[in-house]
Amino acid sequence: MAASTHTVSNQAPPLLGYDVFAADAVLTEAVARHVPADLLDEARDGLGELGRSAGSAQAAQWAAQADGNPPKLRSHDRYGNRVDEVEFHPAWHRLLGHGVTAGLTDAWDRPGGHVRRAAGFLVWTQAEAGHGCPLSMTHAAVPALRADPAVAAEWEPLLTSHAYEEGLRPVAEKAGALLGMGMTEKQGGSDLRAGTTRAEPLAAEGEYLLTGHKWFCSAPMSDGFLVLAQAPGGLTCFLLPRVLPDGTRNVFAIQRLKDKLGNRSNASAEVEFDGTWVRRIGEEGRGVRTVIGMVAATRLDCVTGSAALMRQAVAQAVHHATYRSAFGGVLADKPLMRNVLADLALESEAATVLAMRLAAAYDAGTENEAAFLRIAVPTAKYWVTKRCTPLVGEALECLGGNGYVEESGMPRLLREAPLNSIWEGSGNVQALDVLRALQREPLALNAFLQEVGRARGADHRLDRAIRDLLTELADLEGIEARARRLVERMALVLQGSLLVRWAPPEVADAFCASRLGGDWGSAFGTLPHTLDLASVVARARPVER
């Protein structure tokens, strides 16, 4: 066959060898906005190093290997003894170890820690999302453990350590540890109070034995887990170590691993407890209250993780369209493709700005910011995670058939996209949580309205949307049935307020015209043609500025 038939032309080069952080104008601006000035250079240096790793050919190879070689359950050793271990590909350990070393489990007591960690999580998740689960749970477990100061003193330094050590050993012998959680049961799902796992107290104060099961237990090779069980005093939180202090294995029978749509590099297991030793965290009967801080932190990671998937999908789409020619010109210069790319870029920017604003609220630590988080986190979790799947699907389409091929990486993004909408409570759970906050915590609504109101007078479409939202909030009739509609409007108004204050005028104008002003269709690529869409697309292009 003639060699000339194999000449390759008009193909975009792979998006590799770039700094994922520095090439993201929206994220770099958010870091500059929210990180204290005296920490900014240090934060930028660390995020730049992580960004270059995330954009490297090595990280892309690790991601493909971890995704293509899912974890395997080894329930017994060669002699028939239960070992209940899960084997991961070495690439998984390299990805996870890199995330731990970069401080992605360390935020709570570090100055500017939540913003810096959220930015790093957004950057590193773009390399591969599956290993983000143990990073997220380990980070989020800290506030729950603080319900027992003695336990926190033992475990917190290990969870926030920048040292990664794989393998099951007593945590006293390790320089760093990972923590997971097991809350969901077959019969209950999101209804945690329906759990049937029993906790029988032992003679020693705070020690119990568990009998029961958990339907979803992610990252089962973690060093310990926070679990809920029914103690004599009601639903209670417990710490379950995989290895006991004397070096023996705790009873943690892994029945099977889930065969999942996406998140393939990570293991999710069904586990059984039968005389499993645990230590109580917090008071009996206060289990949900004890873990609520963990739940809120992991929900924020759902928002940040979705923003990361969206950003990577948009970066790939814009990059492809910048190099690919069709119908007599570069794709990115074609008016219709430009409209699609700009619409995707708007959605991605709004998600990133909102995620980073929530992280900044954690760092502020004030009563007003805590009240704001109470309503803003489930609002953002509901909306941003729901927007992820259609955005990634549209971005994949921008690459045409090339995007449908596994080697592009886009199918992995698309499989991963629905996860964050389900994890830590699906859409209805988030919407109902917002309603509870509205009805029971007036400070939360006040803090939310104060935040939104900071942009009043800057855009007439935003002002009208705020007025309409206030009218809707005043009407309690049929409130549960229309909770999704209400929370969607709250999310859009909040995003609009943030963009009007902080984004370039062309971005804020396009967002308000489409998302708030109603000049928008039902699919991406239906923005008003009179907007400055070229500037929006140029801003989203993954190049260092």
Image (tube, rainbow, N blue to C red):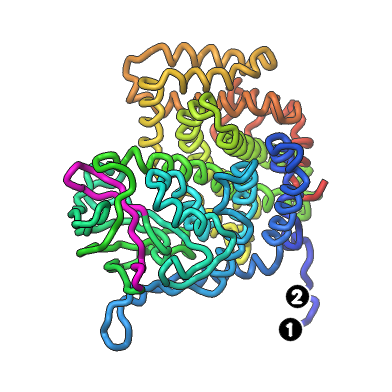
- Of 121 and 176, nearer the camera is 176
Q: Secondary structure at mark 2?
A: helix
Circle number at residue 1: 1
Q: Position of residue 306 (x, y in %)?
A: 54, 46
Q: Which residue is mark 2?
A: 6
Nearer to me, 101 or 478: 101
x, y percent for residue 299: 46, 42
How many other residues sit within 10 Å of disc 2, few (<14), some (14-19) or many (≥20)?
few
Quadrant (top left, top right, bottom left, bottom right) of the N terminus = bottom right
Label 1 with label 2: CB-CB less than 8 Å:
yes
Q: Would you say 39 lies left or right of 382 here?
A: right
Q: Which residues are magenta?
A: 226-246
Classify residue 208 as left or right of residue 257. Answer: left
Q: Give percent across and percent down for residue 458.
A: 69, 16
Front residue of 193/165: it is 165
Q: Amino acid at mark 2?
A: His
Amino acid type at circle 1 is Met
